[in-house]
Image (cartoon, rainbow, N blue to C red):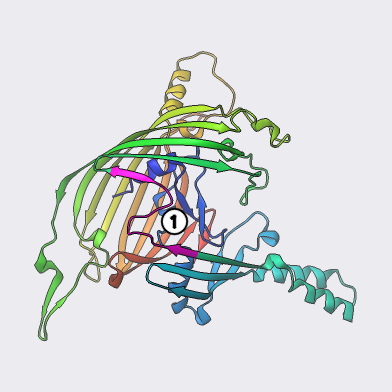
Amino acid sequence: MANLRTAMDAAFWDLNISTPQALDGVARAVPGDPIPLDGSRASRALRIQQVSLLGNGFPLGIIPSFSPSPNHKESGSFALQSLLGKAAFENWWVGLIGQFRPKKLISSIKAEVSAAEEWELPLLKDVAKHFLDKSLYAIGLCSQIALTSTSSLLLSSEKHGLRYRFGLHKNSGLPQAVDSINAPTPLALLPGLCAKAAFSYEKSKDLWRQKERKEDNTVETEKGQFSLPSYDIRLKEPHAAISGIIGGTCEAWLSGGNGSQSVDPSQNTKDRGRFGADLFGSVCYTYQHGKFRNSFGDLTRIDSRLDIGSASALAKKFSNLFRSAQSNGPQNELSSPRLNLIFQQQVAGPIVFRVDSKFSLDSSSGRHGPQLEDLICSLNYSLRLLRSGKVVAWYSRSETRE
């Protein structure tokens, strides 16, 4: 079903989002923003491990990456990535990934040549200098050590139906948007030290489910029996289910709570306050037809999830509806519930077409009905040998990756 943990992870500042704009392929969700789509969650496999696997299917192990940007020349929206080296031990993995931005190089050389009046030796020297531009290249070193099978940098304790977390978050420096030129800095990203706690209670119930039987994994042929498991063990059982999660967060800014205006005088930001608490919740319905085992027509799945990111913002919005004089200031983006819809359809064999969409249920500003906020289309190639691994090529209105 649609991942209910997305609500808690986004509320706790703990959600990794997949992006081609970073070398490691991961960015953090901004606290206070609407809950991202499930399809945008970063893979549990590190980007450097993904490159190690995908490099086997590309010439010379070079993988292309593309990301639209408002400033294409500076950002170098097209990049080539490759694994330069790796080493694996019993409980330690280390690798080095490299990146080159050919589009930025070509744009710089083109501008240099266009401005030149004649082809002379100094011009060739100036063109050669562009190859030495450090912004064209990037390298990333990644190391992962498995202390135990359950070790994590984020300390957490979980018990069935009930989860809670506690953590410290520290920001430094002034964050700048990479996909927008004049975007204001979110208050949650300004410098400071914050202690944050979150809890949630989750419940799920199957309306019906066709359990997998042992004989479902075997096929009789003239040459005998052989195993035919599902392409993805998470999609092996047809079912319909409903589930829900409700939780809350509490935060205290130990430093930087009231001094946000002095960080960037050009921005008129509000005081984020030293203390804050809120509630969130999600409810989900899932329907799946097929066992994703045969070559055709064996998987159709629909997930729908309603998210309420901030109960206090939603309550304030409703209270304003009954007031004659409403505030003309900007509304909290979390005041509107979001409806997430996921559709998955098997194309052929292990290939699945998937659409993730998010709608805002907001009737303000003269708008009526759900408003489409985000859309991600993807093709997923499931790797049966990995039981639940897959290779994904996806496209969204703001970012693309292969």
What is the magenta range? 143-158
Q: Amino acid type of disc 1?
A: Ala
| Residue closest to the far front | 147
Q: Is 145 on the left or on the right of 186, as rendered?
A: left
User: Residue 377's spot in the image, x, y percent?
Assistant: 43, 58
**Residue, x 66% and y 59% (percent of image)?**
75
For label 1, the residue is 42
Q: Is 64 on the left or on the right of 336, as rendered?
A: right
| Residue closest to the far bottom | 223
Q: Is residue 18 visible to us here?
A: yes
For label 1, the SS is loop
- Image quarter of residue 141: bottom right
Nearest the eye: 370 or 394: 394
Q: How many marks?
A: 1
User: Residue 46's spot in the image, x, y percent?
Assistant: 45, 63
Q: Is residue 368 visible to us here?
A: no
Judge whether 344 appears above or below 310 on screen. below
User: Residue 272's spot in the image, x, y percent?
Assistant: 57, 29
Nearest the eye: 44 or 380: 44
Q: Is 314 on the left or on the right of 289, as rendered?
A: right
**Residue, x 36% and y 66% (percent of image)?**
390
